[in-house]
Amino acid sequence: MIGWSQIRDWKLMILSWRVKRRNLPPHGSRLLPPPARGRACSAPRNDVRAGLAFLMLGVSLLCLCGCEKRSAAKPAKGPRGEGGAAVPVAVATVRQRTTPVAVPSFGTVEAYADVEVRAQVTGILEQVHFTEGQMVKKGDPLLSIDPRQPQANLKVAQANLEKEQAQLKNAEREAARQTELLQKGFASQDVYDQAITGVETLRAAVSADQAAVENAALQLDYCSIRSPVDGCTGRLLLHRGNLIKGNDASIVTIRQIDPIYVSFWIQEQHLAAIRKNMAQGALDVAATLPGEENEPIHGALSFIDNTVDPDNRTIHLRATFANQDRRLWPGQYVKVLLTVAQEADSLLVPSQAIQTGQTGRFVYVAKSDQTVEMRTITLKREIGNESVIEGVKAGEVVVTDGQLRLVPGARIQAKSAAGPQGQSRAGERGSPTPDSASGAPNPSPSPSAVTGTSDSSKSEAR
């Protein structure tokens, strides 16, 4: 370390050198020769230059002293943890389990049944028994039409029926008399045939009148419109007091929403696997609403269209969902995940462990000596916050956080998900904890890794 005493000695040496150069007596002597001719201002100018030089020299020495102190206080550290202090990282264990092979898509919610309610008789709309958007049951009254005209028609039909029945009774009595007279030989065959024909004609007329009565009763029943299905009513298009014509415009639409459909499209390349696995049992379909990604709704695939779209090379599918809680609503846009099969012994890692480099995707694998190895992997698919990959083994430990400071062979300070700190960190990052059921080993850091500095790095710092 350079002190002020050394600076003072250097200053005296510089002054002595200046004195010798100017051929002056030793420092402190008062017998100074007169300045040479033509150089009257040389001595003051040299003094100013010497003062500036001394000032710059002092500032430089002070900077050197400060840098030496800071370098002595900081230990030596290699780039990215290589040959220096261990890099703190978060790790997770590679898990092995059965995972679904799923096909993602987007779909639209459709009503299970879509019924347009129309009037079958003409009349004035007298009463509406529901409110728009109300849930109704099958058989609940919806609308009432003025029944007076159908009631009058029913009475006319009943009167005609009674008239024909009375005539039929009279014709039957006449036919009985003609039969008795014919047997005694007092009546001709022609009269007898006319009596029998009259009876049969009146019987047909009675049957027609009975049908007219039934039709009139049916028209009267049409004045009271009831719900044909369980569902939700839509907007009322005709209100009370309007004249309704039979079989004219729709009055209201009822949509059945429990159960409910979700229609979606997938690429034709998945069709063979879907048909093969659907023959063995129902395929699970998960629908996810916007903003509810963690609460999927599960249903079953119920329909495969009989034609592949030749333009887009896609196939139309439809799944059926139970909808008691009415989370699905007709017209909604949802994410769909169709599970085609189950793959055994899949290797899963947290998605944040996967990095992308010039040669493709890779992960850092923690070794037993607390160093890392860069391993090239193949990404097969993603399941939530985890990814199914190839290129690692079950039980190996991968780095999930802190990869930017690592290089192959770098030393690490592993914070495993098994410890309290690792659990909180893994929870914040969304990485799963190691699967204890799989029997994967949980590497314990060495004492040097726990402290974060090895013996060699300590000696270098000294």
Image (cartoon, rainbow, N blue to C red):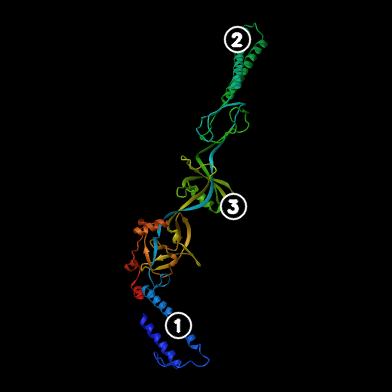
Count neighbours of disc 3 (C-alpha within 10 A) and say few if under 14, some if 14 to 19, many if 20 or more: few
Judging from the image, what secondary structure is the residue with disc 2 in?
helix
Residue underneath mark 1:
51
User: Of the residues tagged 2 and 3, which is closer to the observer?
Assistant: 3
* Amino acid at dot 3: Arg
Nearer-N-terminus badge (2/3): 2
Which image quarter holds the N terminus?
A: bottom left
User: Which corner quadrant holds the C terminus?
Assistant: bottom left
Residue found at the far left of this picture = 447
Residue 134 relative to residue 450: left or right: right
Residue 451 placement (x, y as % from top left): 33, 67
Q: Is residue 161 above or below residue 454?
A: above
Give the CA distance from mark 2 to mark 3: 79 Å
Q: What residue do we see at 35% from left, 70% from top?
A: 453
Task: Please report contact status of discs 2 and 3: CB closer than 8 Å, yes or no.
Answer: no
Marking on residue 251: none
Please state which of residues 27 and 114 is positioned toward the viewer in this rendering: 27
Residue extending furthest toward the right: 190
Report which quarter residue 57 is drawn in. Answer: bottom left
Disc 2 designates what residue?
173
Query: Pointer 2 and pointer 1: residues touching (CB < 8 Å)?
Result: no
Asked whether the viewer can see residue 170, the reply is yes
As measured in the structure, the alpha-carbon distance from the residue carrying label 2 to the one carrying label 1 is 157 Å
Using the image as rendered, state which of residue 328 and residue 48 is in the foreground.
Answer: 48
Q: Which of disc 1 and disc 2 is earlier in sequence?
A: 1
Residue 25 percent coordinates (x, y): 41, 93
Q: CA distance from mark 3 to mark 1?
A: 88 Å
